[in-house]
Image: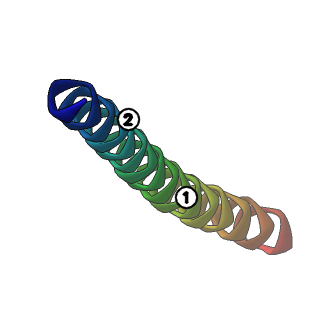
Amino acid sequence: MGEEWMLAVGMVAFWAILIVVVFVVLVIILLDLSALLKLKIKQNQVKLNAMIKDQKS
Protein backbone atom coordinates (compact mmCIF):
# COMPACT_ATOMS: atom_id res chain seq x y z
CA MET A 1 0.00 0.00 0.00
CA GLY A 2 2.69 2.49 1.08
CA GLU A 3 4.96 1.82 -1.90
CA GLU A 4 2.13 2.13 -4.43
CA TRP A 5 1.11 5.47 -2.90
CA MET A 6 4.70 6.74 -3.12
CA LEU A 7 4.89 5.58 -6.76
CA ALA A 8 1.61 7.38 -7.59
CA VAL A 9 2.84 10.59 -5.96
CA GLY A 10 6.14 10.26 -7.84
CA MET A 11 4.33 9.85 -11.17
CA VAL A 12 2.09 12.87 -10.51
CA ALA A 13 5.10 14.97 -9.48
CA PHE A 14 7.01 13.82 -12.58
CA TRP A 15 4.16 14.79 -14.94
CA ALA A 16 3.58 18.09 -13.13
CA ILE A 17 7.27 19.01 -13.49
CA LEU A 18 7.28 17.90 -17.15
CA ILE A 19 4.20 20.03 -17.94
CA VAL A 20 5.69 23.08 -16.19
CA VAL A 21 9.00 22.69 -18.07
CA VAL A 22 7.23 22.35 -21.44
CA PHE A 23 5.03 25.39 -20.63
CA VAL A 24 8.05 27.53 -19.69
CA VAL A 25 9.92 26.51 -22.86
CA LEU A 26 6.86 27.38 -25.00
CA VAL A 27 6.52 30.79 -23.33
CA ILE A 28 10.23 31.53 -23.90
CA ILE A 29 9.96 30.49 -27.56
CA LEU A 30 6.85 32.66 -28.05
CA LEU A 31 8.53 35.66 -26.42
CA ASP A 32 11.61 35.18 -28.62
CA LEU A 33 9.45 34.92 -31.74
CA SER A 34 7.47 38.06 -30.90
CA ALA A 35 10.71 39.95 -30.22
CA LEU A 36 12.14 38.76 -33.55
CA LEU A 37 8.93 39.75 -35.36
CA LYS A 38 9.04 43.24 -33.83
CA LEU A 39 12.67 43.56 -34.94
CA LYS A 40 11.76 42.48 -38.49
CA ILE A 41 8.83 44.91 -38.60
CA LYS A 42 11.09 47.77 -37.47
CA GLN A 43 13.66 46.90 -40.15
CA ASN A 44 10.92 46.78 -42.79
CA GLN A 45 9.58 50.17 -41.67
CA VAL A 46 13.06 51.67 -41.95
CA LYS A 47 13.41 50.21 -45.48
CA LEU A 48 9.94 51.52 -46.45
CA ASN A 49 10.73 54.98 -45.09
CA ALA A 50 13.99 55.04 -47.06
CA MET A 51 12.15 54.00 -50.25
CA ILE A 52 9.49 56.68 -49.73
CA LYS A 53 12.17 59.33 -49.23
CA ASP A 54 13.92 58.19 -52.42
CA GLN A 55 10.69 58.43 -54.40
CA LYS A 56 9.89 61.93 -53.09
CA SER A 57 13.30 63.35 -53.94
Q: Which residue is located at x 45 percent, y 49 percent?
A: 23
Q: Which residue is located at x 55 percent, y 58 percent?
A: 34
Q: Which mark is residue 15?
A: 2
Q: Which residue is located at x 83 percent, y 74 percent?
A: 56
Image quadrant where residue 54 sits: bottom right
Up/down of 39 relative to 57, above or below: above
Q: Which residue is located at x 73 percent, y 59 percent?
A: 51
Name the amino acid type tagged 2.
Trp
Up/down of 18 relative to 40, above or below: above
Please name whichever residue, 12 or 2, is drawn nearer the observer in this view of the structure: 2
Image quadrant where residue 45 sits: bottom right
Dot 2 falls on a residue whose secondary structure is helix
The quadrant the C terminus occupies is bottom right
Q: Which mark is residue 34?
A: 1
What colouring method underlies this structural image? Answer: rainbow
Please name whichever residue, 52 or 38, is drawn nearer the observer in this view of the structure: 38
Please name whichever residue, 48 or 52, is drawn nearer the observer in this view of the structure: 48
Dot 1 falls on a residue whose secondary structure is helix
Answer whether labels 2 and 1 touch (C-beta < 8 Å).
no
The quadrant the N terminus occupies is top left
Of circles 2 and 1, the one toward us is 2
Image quadrant where residue 52 sits: bottom right
Q: Which circle's residue, 2 or 1, is located before the other in the chain?
A: 2
